[in-house]
């Protein structure tokens, strides 16, 4: 078993899609080990996405991620990181495969409804960002 972090982003919480995402995760047999709802401060969003700070979309991303509630969840499954990345689909929903969460509900490349850790190392780091 391994762990990963998912975050339901503000575009999805705003459209009342928390239950939908939770249901997709549970049906895909992820075990939800922790879950909370919060608003990120500007400093938290900047730190969480620090790896992207030189990218042109960084400031807009921080503004978006602080614009409403987010729901971070700690998940467990065999090969959790890869399984979750497969379930959410490509960053740009126009390129996401049919059946993925982003294909279903993402609005655009920024407002793409969910975050998922991209490696076991980052998963551990991101889980400790939100959970004790
Ligand atoms: P992912 O979330 O699929 O791991 P990245 O780590 O590359 O994608 O990017 C982090 C987040 O930054 C994306 O989920 C999205 O919200 C935003 N983002 C990425 N690329 C762009 C872009 N070209 N324009 C606007 N926002 C972007
Ligand atoms: Mg990423």
Image (tube, rainbow, N blue to C red):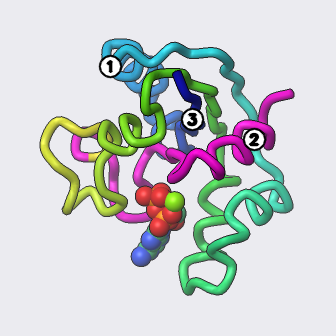
Mark 3: few, some, or many residues within 10 Å (few <14, many ≥20)?
many
Q: Classify residue 123 as left or right of residue 105.
A: right
Residue 88 position within the rendered picture, expressed as x and y whole percent measured from the top left: 34, 42
Quarter of the rendering occupied by the C terminus? top right
**What residue did someone put label 2 on?**
39
Check if mark 1's residue and mark 3's residue have beta carbons within 8 Å: no
> Residue placed at 81% from the left, 60% from the top?
42
Relative height, residue 120 to residue 109 (above, below): above
Whichever of callouts 1 and 3 sits on the residue coming sooner in the sequence is 3
Residue 34 position within the rendered picture, expressed as x and y whole percent measured from the top left: 68, 18
Label 1, label 3: how far apart the Cα atoms are:
14 Å
**What residue did someone put label 3 on?**
4
Relative height, residue 24 to residue 79 (above, below): above
User: Magenta residues?
Assistant: 103-132
Residue at disc 2, secondary structure: strand
Q: Quadrant of residue 26?
A: top left
Q: Quadrant of residue 20?
A: top left
Residue at disc 1, secondary structure: loop
Q: Which mark is residue 28?
A: 1
């Amino acid at each position: 078993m391994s762990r990963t972090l998912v975050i339901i982003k503000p575009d999805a919480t705003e459209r009342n899609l928390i239950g939908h995402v939770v249901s997709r995760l549970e049906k895909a047999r992820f075990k939800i080990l922790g879950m909370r709802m919060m608003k990120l401060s500007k400093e938290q969003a900047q730190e969480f996405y620090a790896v992207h700070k030189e990218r042109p979309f960084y400031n807009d991303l921080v503004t978006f991620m602080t614009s409403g509630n987010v729901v971070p969840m700690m998940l467990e499954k065999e090969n959790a990181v890869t399984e979750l990345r497969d379930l959410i689909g490509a960053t740009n929903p126009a390129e996401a495969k049919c059946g993925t969460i982003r294909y279903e509900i993402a609005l655009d490349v920024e407002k793409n409804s969910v975050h998922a850790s991209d490696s076991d190392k980052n998963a551990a780091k991101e889980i400790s960002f939100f959970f004790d």
